[in-house]
Amino acid sequence: MGFVWYLTAFLASSAVFSSNDAGGIRGVEGQYLLGLGIGDITGPVVETNMMGYASLGQTDTGLHMRERSRAFIIAEEANPANRVVFINADIAMGDTGVRRTIVSRLSALFPSLYTNTNIAFVGTHQHSGVGGYLENLLPQITSLGYVNQTANAIVEGTVLAVQRAHGNLKSGKLGLGNTTVLNANINRSPSAYLANPAEERARYEFDQDKDMTVLRFDDDSGEARGFLSFFAVHGTSLYENNTLVSADNKGMAAFLYEASVEPNSMPGNNTFVAGFTQSNVGDTSPNTLGAFCESPGEDFDGMACDFDHSTCGGTVQDCHGRGPGFRISDFESNRLIGQAQLEGAKTVMEGGNLTPVAGAVRSVHVYMDMANHTFALPNGTTVQTCPAAMGFSFAGGTTDGPGAFDFVQGDNSSNPQNPFWEIVKGAVTPPPSAAQIACQDPKPILLNTGYAHFPYEWSPSTVDIQMLRVGNFVMLIMPGELTTMAGRRIREAVRAQLISQGIIGDDAYVVIAGPANTYAHYVTTREEYGVQRYEGASTIFGQYTLEAYINKYTNLLPFIADTVTGTPASDAAPAEQTSKAISLQTGVVFDAAPIGKRFGDVLTDVSTTSAYRAGDTVFAQFVGANPRNNLRLEGTFLNVDQLTSGGAWTPVKSDSHPSTVYRWERTSTVLGTSTVNISWTIEDGTPSGTYRLRYFGDSKPLIGSISPFTGTSSNFMVTA
Ligand SMILES: *[C@@H]1O[C@H](CO)[C@@H](O)[C@H](O)[C@H]1NC(C)=O
Ligand SMILES: *[C@@H]1O[C@H](CO)[C@@H](O)[C@H](O)[C@H]1NC(C)=O
Ligand SMILES: *[C@@H]1O[C@H](CO)[C@@H](O)[C@H](O)[C@H]1NC(C)=O
Ligand SMILES: *[C@@H]1O[C@H](CO)[C@@H](O)[C@H](O)[C@H]1NC(C)=O
Ligand SMILES: *[C@@H]1O[C@H](CO)[C@@H](O)[C@H](O)[C@H]1NC(C)=O
Ligand SMILES: *[C@@H]1O[C@H](CO)[C@@H](O)[C@H](O)[C@H]1NC(C)=O
Ligand SMILES: *[C@@H]1O[C@H](CO)[C@@H](O)[C@H](O)[C@H]1NC(C)=O
Ligand SMILES: *[C@@H]1O[C@H](CO)[C@@H](O)[C@H](O)[C@H]1NC(C)=O
């Protein structure tokens, strides 16, 4: 597979270059070379901590939908060396180490085409993906260290997505439009938002951004090939009690959109690519009904949580945000928030009033050490950022996931709860100096992570500062989660400077994409920082973090002008951490089938006596093996097959359809036995006919190599 893709990509790239180089053809203004690709990045779906809520108990047990990277390449047709690649990955956030490997792999495959400067690696900020891939220590605590298999899956699938995008580069056009999406987000820290000046708030209708921006990719005949959309809403429709690997509301929106364009493609095998990108997500929530107390037996049960502190009876644990499908299920909330974003994107894609995008393709990237960055505010006052620190409210979590990182309570040697924490807690962050306390003021410091370097860096100090420009459209690739107002301030500051410096005209259009590249937690306004809710407590570089970013991004604008001279000054790249990484996750020891059974044997069969109808769930249980033996990237752990009139079986559903669920359960560690449950909830409109469930597994003997096997249910009938 790898070699074939490389060959295809190579042939395509040489075709592109020979036509331009040989003829010296100048592209029609506004025309670009466009490439779109998709790749499977799903790490181990069992026995691995999930990423987002930082909850030790959230260990995955199966699969709802696969995670994907979607790559979008834009090059100037007249000068294809000027190009950018935007990667939208179904993961909680970008990461320095994963990005480093992706950049090095792509620059080896495509020398000088894809570089550290023009590759943006953006996470959708979903909270139901596989964890353990982040390079810094703090986010590894709940995953018991680094999980190389997760990081490798993200790298492989992302590189494949870019190779595919490169392989289908062809001439096309871009259009830009926007719409409002009213029913998909709320502000989860309104009391902090209210600290922003009244006259500033008065300029906006809502306390979160309701605008969705869409960049439409067309071929030369005007046929849509896909799009990138930008909309701010947390990927927390699925709560921390969900243990099925999924892609939350943005992954759902992408699946629904792609399936609406190519209903007969298996998920991930489509050519139309729908990019739902995260934006200034910091204080947004998809739990649009608000946050309520789930406190059975208490008189405040079912009431709204305390406004300022999101508590119920004084503690955060019972306060939960509710999504629009609350009465039905968390998966229904996820579907509805995905559907709302799909509808926003369709409104723009089908609305016909997109503005054509024309002009230069540019990118700029520098490293910035945020630990102690001194700079002048616009009024001339010199200020500085601080080495990273997390405030007390960080441990309180949010209404989307209360009590995140409650490992702090695990620091009780009589009762060790987390073996990884037991190893690293001796290095628990040194007490903050008077200078650090003053710098981080008014944040009370819980974890002084900027001073914790053992056994390796707990938090990043050096972040990626990056911008991509296509004509009048500028994407700020941000290393963290900006709140609503922080995002508005930096967008407006950058746009004003683009215009005043004459880099782009009055049509300059600026969006935020993130959390991307390095994960440097949150960015609030200085006023919100003063309130120290979760987002302020997680603004790690101090009260001037946002101002430092505004200063840096605006200073870099000359490097995305039509004519660029020189290269920007950069701090040193952050040191590589993964070679020092501690990993406590044990590998698969062995698999065995119970005596008298074989792998894939059916333990509980489908019903063969009566037909199923739409809305019914078909279920079968099989003798299983650990799915960590083979991630089956680009493949599937299950199929629903339909019997065709010619007598052949055709797969109609895979493990990535939201209607199917794959669950794995170890039944004996000593004997190495496990079971797999497969279910399919039949969609409306499913054709009548004969179907069967199939299970694809891989078993690991105590001695010898891993080998594949298949399980097959009995045939069953579906009637419309
Ligand atoms: C992770 O896996 C990759 C690919 O198998 C390997 O090259 C690398 O050395 C591993 N890294 C660690 C820290 O185990
Ligand atoms: C939406 O597009 C219009 C037209 O380009 C523009 O004036 C407006 O500022 C855009 N809205 C946002 C939120 O960017
Ligand atoms: C998961 O947690 C949410 C929020 O507390 C709750 O509403 C929901 O019922 C829980 N789901 C399950 C399956 O326990
Ligand atoms: C993916 O699409 C290609 C081309 O349409 C087709 O040949 C292939 O069988 C499909 N693969 C799957 C798994 O559906
Ligand atoms: C930060 O920089 C200032 C001024 O250069 C210096 O006085 C201070 O010691 C530095 N602090 C740290 C923690 O490096
Ligand atoms: C500049 O602005 C900062 C932040 O608003 C403020 O603290 C400082 O006093 C101002 N300096 C002057 C000279 O006005
Ligand atoms: C463990 O934590 C509990 C609750 O905070 C506390 O009462 C107890 O004294 C602690 N034990 C030790 C050995 O620190
Ligand atoms: C699999 O299905 C069986 C039978 O319904 C059930 O008892 C078991 O809990 C299921 N396992 C998982 C992991 O959901």
Image (cartoon, grey):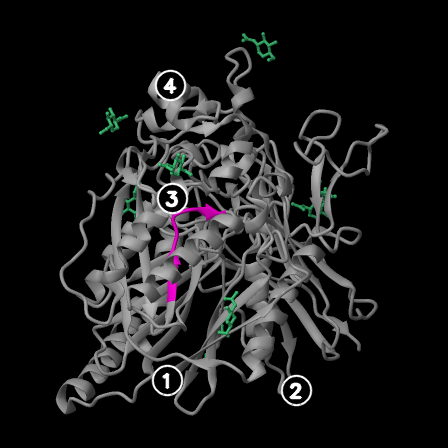
Mark in the foreground, 3 or 4: 3
The 10 Å Cα crowd at callout 1, few under 14, some 14 to 19, many 20 or more, is many
- Residue depicted at 56% across the width and 76% down the height: 348
Badge number at residue 645: 2
Residue labelled 3 has its Cβ within 8 Å of some atom of ligand 6: yes
Q: CA distance from mark 1 to mark 3?
A: 38 Å
User: Which element is circle 4 on?
Assistant: loop
Q: Quadrant of residue 457?
A: top left
Which comes sooner in the sequence, label 2 or label 3? Answer: 3
Chief secondary structure of the magenta span? Answer: strand
Q: Nearer the viewer, mark 1 or mark 3?
A: 3
Q: Where is mark 1, residue-wise? A: 172
Q: Nearer the viewer, residue 703 or 178?
A: 178
Q: Nearer the viewer, residue 316 or 357?
A: 357
**In this rendering, would 389 be left or right of 666?**
left
Q: Which residues are magenta?
A: 474-482
Task: Calculate the distance from the C-alpha at mark 3 to the C-alpha at mark 4.
Answer: 23 Å
